[in-house]
Amino acid sequence: GAGVSQSPRYKVAKRGQDVALRCDPISGHVSLFWYQQALGQGPEFLTYFQNEAQLDKSGLPSDRFFAERPEGSVSTLKIQRTQQEDSAVYLCASSHLSRETQYFGPGTRLLVL
Amino acid sequence: AQSVTQLGSHVSVSEGALVLLRCNYSSSVPPYLFWYVQYPNQGLQLLLKYTTGATLVKGINGFEAEFKKSETSFHLTKPSAHMSDAAEYFCAVIGTNFGNEKLTFGTGTRLTIIP
């Protein structure tokens, strides 16, 4: 079946703009994760959902970052008042159950000017 | 809390030579261990994983890794490198304690294959 998809693949934003990044997980996957990958670094955890419940948001760097998954499927990561340090690749992953293999999408590359 | 250390941010090997990418972890409990590969402008693809059982794990594309609890290591190997193996490789862990679902990644190793 289809893998994890993310849109847009590339986003350029002016500093101060709000952005919304979308993730479509693999159908039927209960768990959904967001990671941030800075240039030359490994991905870093942002937040985790089990169905529609956000169980861990300890990695969100500030209150400008907000994620939701209202119907337990598609998820949106929103960044308000973007800053240059928000420039990174944002990866979404899903897994069938907790602690099973996470399958990653291609990522959204965000550039804040 | 767990952490992952990948020794060598860049590794170069000749085509046909042994590939060895090193990974050491720190965790209060034995974790689940993963190796992912990332090709340019793509997401991460799972190569292999260790959860329980046999400590030598075989993955896709001829890669394998061995979990050594005494050394807290999970090094990735491949007997003979191919040009198509050039990519970024990430070692990652998930703690087995309840409620810990996130992957913690190392900083990655960029593998270059010399023709």
Image: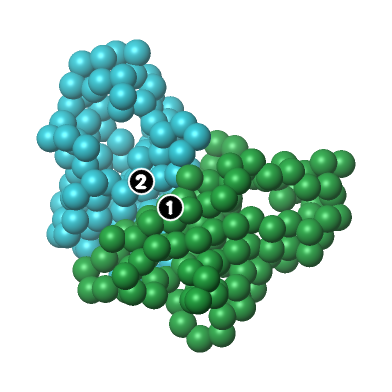
Which numbered disc covers residue B105?
Answer: 1
Foreground: B5 or A11?
B5
Within 10 Å of disc 2 (Cα), the crowding (few <14, some 14-19, many 20+) is many
Residue B38 percent across, percent down from the top left:
56, 47
> Mark 2 falls on what kind of element?
strand
Identify the residue position indicated by label 2 in the image: A44
Which numbered disc covers residue B92?
Answer: none
Foreground: B50 or A69?
B50
Is A47 on the left or on the right of B82, as rendered? left
Chain A painted colour: cyan
Q: Quadrant of residue B31?
A: bottom left
Q: Tell me the amino acid under the disc marked 2.
A: Glu
Residue A87 percent across, percent down from the top left:
36, 26
Chain B painted colour: green
**Does the residue at mark 2 contact the one at mark 1 (Cβ under 8 Å)?**
yes
Q: Tell me the amino acid under the disc marked 1.
A: Phe
Report the label total.
Answer: 2
Q: Is residue A65 above or below residue B83?
A: above
